[in-house]
Image (tube, rainbow, N blue to C red):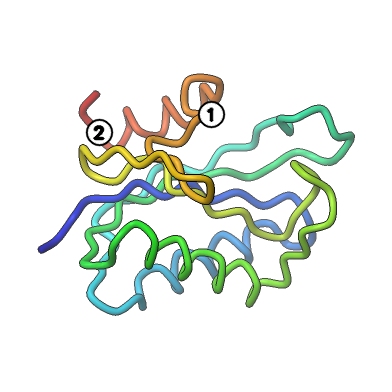
Amino acid sequence: MHHLAYIALGANLGDRDHYLAFARNALAALSGSRVVAESSVEETPPAGGVPQGAFLNQMIALETELSPHALLAELHRIENEAGRVRTIHWGPRTLDLDIVRYGDDHVDEPDLVIPHPQLANRDWWQRELAELGAKE
């Protein structure tokens, strides 16, 4: 069964364009998945209060057979391949991938919350979802 997941891509270290392209290619290569739409890329200030550079952000609509947890594991693998190091919560990173929505599913577990709990606080995600025609 295919589900439509919306994945947020963000990068604020190194060659930000390269890291977003790397993520798009890695998502397109996931087993049982295909990218069906991409939002525009936009630059945004960092969230979370940690001093750091601006982010490039983009939203991807991904049709996938992966479960939410399997998808999250793949996103973490892709982040690791892009050299992400988790040292400071909400700190600078080469690549950040978040499941913003996963069909109409709701997940509330310690390691995964869907819809993403920061959705209401990130106006760029809302703009990107709207650009992709995501239904509320």
Q: Secondary structure at mark 2?
A: loop
Residue 131 location, x and y as percent? 33, 32
Q: State the residue in front, 54 or 67.
A: 67
- Going from N to C along the chain, the mark reached first, 2 or 1, is 1
Extreme residue toward the front, this view: 110
Q: Which quadrant holds the N terminus?
A: bottom left
Give above or below for 120 relative to 64.
Answer: above
Give the residue type that dot 1 points to.
Gln
| Residue to which mark 1 is pinned | 118
Three-letter code for the amino acid on which mark 2 is drawn? Ala
Query: The C terminus lies in which quarter of the figure?
Result: top left
Task: Specify few, some or many for label 1: CA neighbours under 10 Å numbering under 14, 14-19, or 20 or more.
Answer: few
On the image, the x and y values in percent for residue 35 come to 29, 61
Q: Which mark is residue 132?
A: none
Residue 54 drawn above or below residue 97: above
Residue 56, above or below 1: above
**Rendering quarter of residue 107:** top left
Q: Residue at x 44, y 41 (%)?
A: 113
**Along the horizontal axis of the image, is 55 left or right of 98?**
right
Residue denoted by label 2: 134
**Left or right, residue 44 beside residue 104:** right
